Amino acid sequence: NDVICPSWAGYGSWSSCSRTCGGGTRTRSRGCSNGNVGQDGCPTSGATQSQLCNTQACQSAQPTWSDFGSWSGCSTTCGVGSRSRTRVCIGGSIGVVGCEAGGESATQSCNTGIRCPTWTRWSDWGECSLTCGGGTQTSTRTCNTFGQAGATCVGRASRSQICNQQTCPSWSAYGSWSICSSTCGGGSRSRSRTCNNGQIGNIGCSPASAASQSMVCNTNSCPQWTAWVAGDATSTQSCNTGACSTSPCSNKVNLAALAECRSYATLGYCISYSVYMLQNCAYSCCLIEQQTNSCLNLQDYLGFGLCASYRHLCTEALIQLNCPYTCRCT
């Protein structure tokens, strides 16, 4: 904008003193260049100046007040303030008759006609920076200057406070490992932990799958028997890996652990269920199934007391063919 701003011209000459003695006043004034008095650059209060003059005492005069000087500027640049002016005691001192104390100054209010900058209301508190463990949140406000360039508000534009101070969820230490589900051949064991100050799935205790751990254990091979080798009176088993309990058939008394094997052997199961019997009843079938068995050393087998139970089967061809001595026990 190329327009020249209003500004004060120089003051003119002082006027004549209003009194010849006892304190009078004189004034001088100035004009506003490129504008009018009252515009920006030429405020009304600056158009004139006054000062005391001829303050010497008048002959045989009682002390008296001089005229008041000019008003001071307003105490504030916006809103309502105050201004003052003073005078002196001529022919005496303040407090004497004619110049009573308190009369030396005067004040009055002044309105600048300009609205002072003011803050808006504080905003709501913002989101906390942390969900736990102590975060911060802020609130703000703005300064309304009512269009006055360069104007500011006194105070701060933002404030903050601590929020969400509760302890954060966290995993406890894992507990002890459980006992392995198997003593050999590969089992599993597990251990678990809990969530402190929260629930599993909360931040700090996630994912939920992290609440437990598992691992393979006892992967060593388990001890196991080989299949029975059938076909003669000395059938035996071999033990694969580990310490198997051995009881070979060579003594003709190993009828396996199943209690029913002995009775199965006497009822012809070795023929009808040969595979099962040879695998599970061992020597019971070794002795009876051999069609060419001459029952040599049969006494050892009969030593179990089975002779008596075999007698009622002497009419069956299986017994007569394979173990004739059994029937001669009668």
Image (cartoon, grey):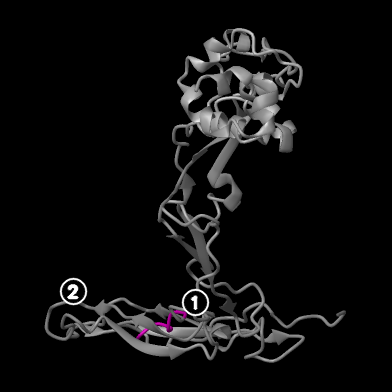
Report the front residue among 143 and 216: 216
Q: Position of residue 289 (x, y in %)?
A: 71, 24
Please tell me whether mark 2 sits on a helix, a strand or a loop.
Answer: loop
Instruction: Residue under label 1, please give it.
Output: 122
- Image quadrant containing the N terminus: bottom right
The mark nearer the N terminus, 2 or 1, is 2
Q: Position of residue 199 (x, y in %)?
A: 47, 57
Instruction: Residue under label 2, please give it.
Output: 93
Instruction: Name the residue: 64% across, 34% down.
Output: 316
Instruction: Name the residue: 48% across, 46% down.
Output: 170
Note whether 186 is above or below 234 in the view shown. below
Residue 70 falls within the magenta-colored stretch: yes
Report the front residue among 267 and 235: 267
Q: Position of residue 58 (x, y in %)?
A: 26, 82
Instruction: Name the residue: 67% across, 76% down.
Output: 149
Instruction: Name the residue: 73% across, 89% down.
Output: 35
Contact between marks 2 and 1 (CB within 8 A): the answer is no
For the question of whether residue 223 can be seen, the reply is: no
Please tell me whether mark 1 sits on a helix, a strand or a loop.
Answer: loop
Report the front residue among 78 and 218: 218
The kind of residue tagged 2 is Ser
Secondary structure that dominates the magenta span: loop
Crowding at dot 1, Cα within 10 Å, few <14 / some 14-19 / many 20+, comes out as few
